[in-house]
Image (tube, rainbow, N blue to C red):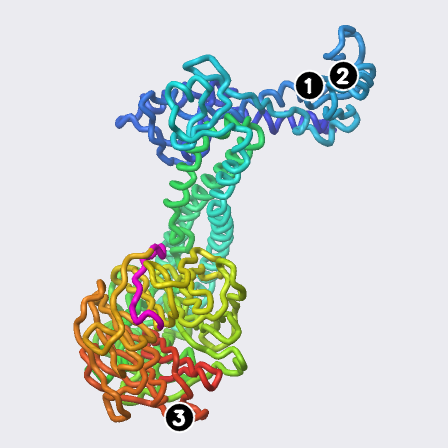
Amino acid sequence: MAERPSAAQEALSKVEDQLSCLVCLEPYTNPRLLSCFHVYCQHCLEDIVAHNRQGQLECPKCRRPTPLPPTGVSGLQAAFNVHHLFDIQETLKKVKEPQKLACEKCSKTTRKATSFCRQCTKFICDLCTSIHKEYEEFEGHEIVTLEKVEGDLIRLVSPKKTSPSCPKHDEKMKLYCEPCGELICRDCLVHIHKDHKYCVIADTFESHKKEILDSLGPVEKQLEATDTALVNLDGRHAEIIEHGRKIATNIHSKFDEIHQALYAREGELMAELEGHTQQQLKSLSAQREEVEILQTQRSSCLHFVRESIRTGSPGDVLKMKQGVVKQVRELVDTFDPNTLEPRETTNTCFVPSAQLVKECKEFGAIGIPSVTVTPTKRPDKTRVQVVASLQTSNIKHQLIQIPSSTIKAELISKSTNQITQCIVKERGKGEYEISYQPTVGGASELIVRVGGEEVAGSPFPVAVKSPIDKLGTVIKTIGDLKSPRPDGVALNQPGEIIVAEQGAGIVSIFNPTGDKLRTLDTRGTAVGEMKNPQGVAVDGDDNILVVDRGNHRLLKFSRGGDLIAAVGSHGDGPGQLNNHFGVCVNSVNGKVYVVDYGANCVHIFNSDLTFSSKFGSKGIGNGQFNYPYDVASDRSGCVYVADYYNHRVQVFTPDGGYLRQFGKKGSGNGELNRPASICVDSDDLVYVGESENNRVSVFTCEGVFLKSFGSYGSGPGQFNGPNGIAVDQCGVVYVSDYGNNRVQILS
């Protein structure tokens, strides 16, 4: 039996593997770093460029291109961490035979080494070990006995962190120029960087190191995503094989029933199935290779940067900082999550022909039913989608006819779980019509099955919009908010319901079924804390905007609740807030509009919450306000303001230019009484919550009255101060029922 290699031999083998260039297979000479964080010899890279017709440099391992600096390959970042591996290699060669090690510190070279000093990077004898412990100059040196060396081989050698010398002035570069992102010496500071902001490397290194490490966060997540994707791809690989086996079994059973007449065709179909399965597996293997490349790039990035920071001097690290951070950002920006989803599916099915013996030669097909959901055009007030189309084709993309009885479809409401059975009609060879007439609006799913198996893409999302004339039926209530009265309400892209509970000083987020998911609970007066949240809105990135009336501030949080920005203070100056209530984000220009009840104006902030402008003043004329309460915008960017004590809605251009108004005091159709909330849906219908009439009135964007619903009370569909409104893409209305401590969801 061969003798097992020692720990030192195993460690030496691993280190030597890392020191071999993948191109020449020899130890690195003048190693250079590519933008994908792979390292090669300089002369190997120069050969690659010389043999490339376009003179480009492409990584031999992951094929990612690296832009060449003006000086060519020699101008690429040196992989200084590799030099540390060479030092480790030399030390490990000595450790392989510890009985032959002599002291490398004292003059008596015949003394046997018994320990290793990490700081001196030398093997020392017992006498030198005693001197290390007694003399102050060796304080802090780490001594490792040879008996313990075997368990900590790689840590034997401390990285040589030396400050690089200035190529212009032959002086150590101990300063860092912030604007230029360069290491400089004192002469550079005097002659070249005189008026630039600079700092001592030792003083600023930790903050810059943190910035580099922070930039790796997205890469870590992407690496995790690639790991998961590879597992999913392997799982899909097994599923496709297993699914192919099931289809093969189905084919065999069908052909056994028809006996000898179909045996020849059976072989053809089996060949088609095998070819299709192999084609899928080949496609899946190609995708797996793509994901492995993404994984390799990000793994190399993480390994190189961390090792460079661990082993490099502050100067070395800062010298490479700008290039590395740029490369990391490029790596993050070029990441496409769509690459991670398996492109192949297991929706292959065996479809037997209707005519058996008569059509024996063409019996059956390996089919992949394809479905397209096509909503019908609808009149303005009839907003129910009723038709989808389905096509069935084989793997040659030829339409094939199958019995309509094998096609089943049903529509399921996501809010009520109500199931609507669909009718399937044949329209011609391989084409079918799926019709349904839902009785409830909202987000729904269309499930289509052929031969008992769901087709690819099923369930299909369907936005069922209730007719306006039927609007007002309560389908769900988020209640029991107790003393924290709900004020503003908004929706994000995943359909989560965001509610400002002003009495409690918090913002709560619920899922579409009404279960609380999380809370923005930062009660207080400090920056980023909330005292009295009134209005809420969501921008295009699903960030949450909160009007904090108590602290006279406008806050922006990420979807997860991290504070992004906080602006505002009490006053009447630019960007100052007096007594603000509603907020909206204009989908056209991305700006944020805040109504200021106390100042009788509307503030306009840029997307980063810097102040842009404001419009409005106190009065009853066009463009004037008498305590505005809420604000909204439509698809064209026009701004709608609920003018509370003027009992009207005023419409403005995105810059605040007056356009029109509608509404007057009263309780009749089209009349308003203290409009406190406003929202515009995806069809540009305007929903106005009336505080005094305790109802919601619906208008066109031109101010034509369509419908109102609600009355005073605490029952379903009744209100006690509708102070916030949001409408989703299905026309489902979410009303913040202030006095009843609840949010009602109506369709």
At label 3, counting other C-alpha atoms closer than 10 Å, the crowd grade (few under 14, some 14-19, many 20 or more) is some
What's the residue type where badge 1 is placed?
Cys
User: Disc number at residue 124?
Assistant: 2
Q: Which residue is mark 1?
A: 120
Q: Is residue 389 visible?
A: no
Q: Which residue is mark 3?
A: 712
Q: Secondary structure at mark 2?
A: strand
* Of the two numbered discs 2 and 3 in the rendering, the one whose residue sits closer to the viewer: 3
User: Disc number at residue 162?
Assistant: none
Q: In 3D space, how far apart are the residues under numbered discs 1 and 3 (Cα atoms)?
A: 85 Å
**What is the quadrant of residue 461 in the picture?**
bottom left
**What is the quadrant of residue 604 in the picture?**
bottom left
Q: 474 or 246: nearer the eye? A: 474
Q: Is residue 414 magenta?
A: no
What's the residue type where badge 3 is placed?
Tyr
Q: In 3D space, how far apart are the residues under numbered discs 2 and 1 (Cα atoms)?
A: 10 Å
Q: Earlier in the sequence, mark 2 or mark 3?
A: 2
**What is the quadrant of residue 711 in the picture?**
bottom left
In the rendered structure, which segment of residues is drawn in magenta?
598-610
Q: Quadrant of the C terminus?
A: bottom left
Report x, y in % for residue 585: 32, 65
Quick check: marks 2 and 1 in contact, CB under 8 Å?
Answer: yes
Quick check: marks 2 and 3 in contact, CB under 8 Å?
Answer: no
